[in-house]
Every structure is written in structure tokens, then in C-alpha cells.
Image (cartoon, helix red, strand yellow):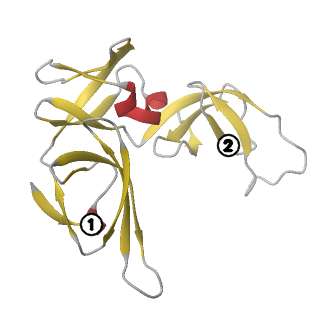
Amino acid sequence: MVKVIASSVRKGNVLDVDGKLYVVLTAQNFHPGKGTPVTQVDMRRISDGVKVSERYRTTEQVERAFVEDRPHTFLYEDGEGFHFMNPESYDQLVMSSDDIGDQKAYLQEGMVCTLSTHEGVAIAIELPRHVTLEITETEPVTKGQTASSSYKPAMLSNGVRTLVPPHITAGTRVIIATEDGSYVERAKD
């Protein structure tokens, strides 16, 4: 176990709280005008999936569990879960749909992800920052709409809705941020 200050905790970190392991879903630092800065951490207990929200003073010490982060290639999904392979040893790990959460929409066959393992069990996943997807449907451009600040709704090939600039049409390949599903830019391929 490694003690770190609460303000350095990030999404995907694994914390040991009272002998139980938790994976961090979100971590935000708040600096109010008066009072002590705090870090709000939303976590999921690995053993049973219960979600917990904690507040720590930003200088308070929290225990990070020792986890091994290694690249794994996503193979496929079946009734068992999501299958990943270690490219060095060819060992396969399975993660449940609950462990992956809403990130599963961005998983693509052959995608290299970073899996965090604790004692040989996959407990957290980190996807690449951006994925390339195709726009399947979007609204037509409205005349007089300014391109600088207006966005229109669009459906991606993975079934996720996002907002894109008015010049993007159906069939266009775009780069999407996996963290929040937002449009980054038009794909250059």
C-alpha cells in the first residue's frame, strides 16, 4: 500500500479504505473561497459493486492499493463478459459489464486498453483517450446557423448520442473523447 494525498487521486485509481478495495469513478477538487479545500471522490467497491461517495481534505492521506497496470487487447464480448488478452503472455482476462460501466460503448475489437489487476483479477479499465467512429444519423444544417458556437445532435455507430458541428453529415468519420463522449474533430482517414 502507498499513501498519497487526496488531491492526487484520479479516475481509475484503486484505493484501500478500511481494508476494502474501491475503484475511483470520479475525483474532483473543490477550493471554496473560505474554508478547507476538499476532494470529492466517487468510488465503487470491487467486491460487491456498491457505490460510495467520500470527501477528504486535499492534504489528507489515502491508501492506494498496489495494482498492476498492463496493456491488454480487447477480443470480444459474450455471455461471460468482456474478454481481454495480454499481448506478451497471451493470458486472457474477463471483465463483467458492471466493471466496465458506460465505457463499454467505446470498446472496439482489437483496441488496446490498460487493465488494472489486483492479485490476478481485472478490477479497472482505462480506454484510449480518443476513438474514431462514424456518424450514422444527424439533422440537416439549418440555414443561418453560425458554425462557431452551435452544435447539432448526432447518433454514432456505437449507438451513443453526441453533439457535432453543423458541417458534419451522416457517414462522416469523427474522433470522439472516450471520457465524456464529446466530439473532438473530423477523422483524417
Which residue is pictured at 26% across the width and 38% down the height? 46
> Where, by quadrant of the figure, is residue 123 drawn?
top left
Between residue 114 and residue 41, name the one nearer to us.
Answer: 41
Between residue 179 and residue 117, name the one nearer to us.
Answer: 117
Question: How many angstroms separate mark 2 from mark 1 (CA)?
Answer: 36 Å
Q: Is residue 13 left or right of residue 161?
A: left
Q: Is residue 32 left or right of residue 73?
A: right
- Residue 77, horizontal then vertical, whole percent: 38, 15
**For discs 2 and 1, the disc positioned in front in the rendered view:** 1
Above or below 151: residue 160? above
Label of residue 130 in the image: none
> Where, by quadrant of the figure, is residue 4 drawn?
bottom left
Q: Is mark 2 on a helix, strand or loop?
A: strand
Amino acid at dot 2: Val
- Residue 18, horizontal then vertical, whole percent: 18, 54
Between residue 110 and residue 8, name the one nearer to us.
Answer: 8
Characterize the local packing of mark 2: few (<14), some (14-19) or many (20 or more) Cα atoms within 10 angstroms.
many
Amino acid at dot 1: Ala
- Residue 126, horizontal then vertical, whole percent: 32, 40
Between residue 111 and residue 23, name the one nearer to us.
Answer: 23
Residue sitting farthest toward the bottom: 34
Q: Is residue 177 left or right of residue 2?
A: right
- Residue 155, horizontal then vertical, whole percent: 66, 30
Which residue is pictured at 80% across the width and 34% down the height? 139
Q: What element carries label 1?
A: helix
Label of residue 164 in the image: 2
Residue 189 seen in the figure: no
Above or below 115: residue 152? below
Residue 66 seen in the figure: yes
> Mark 1 or mark 2, which is nearer the start of the sequence?
1
Label of residue 6 in the image: 1
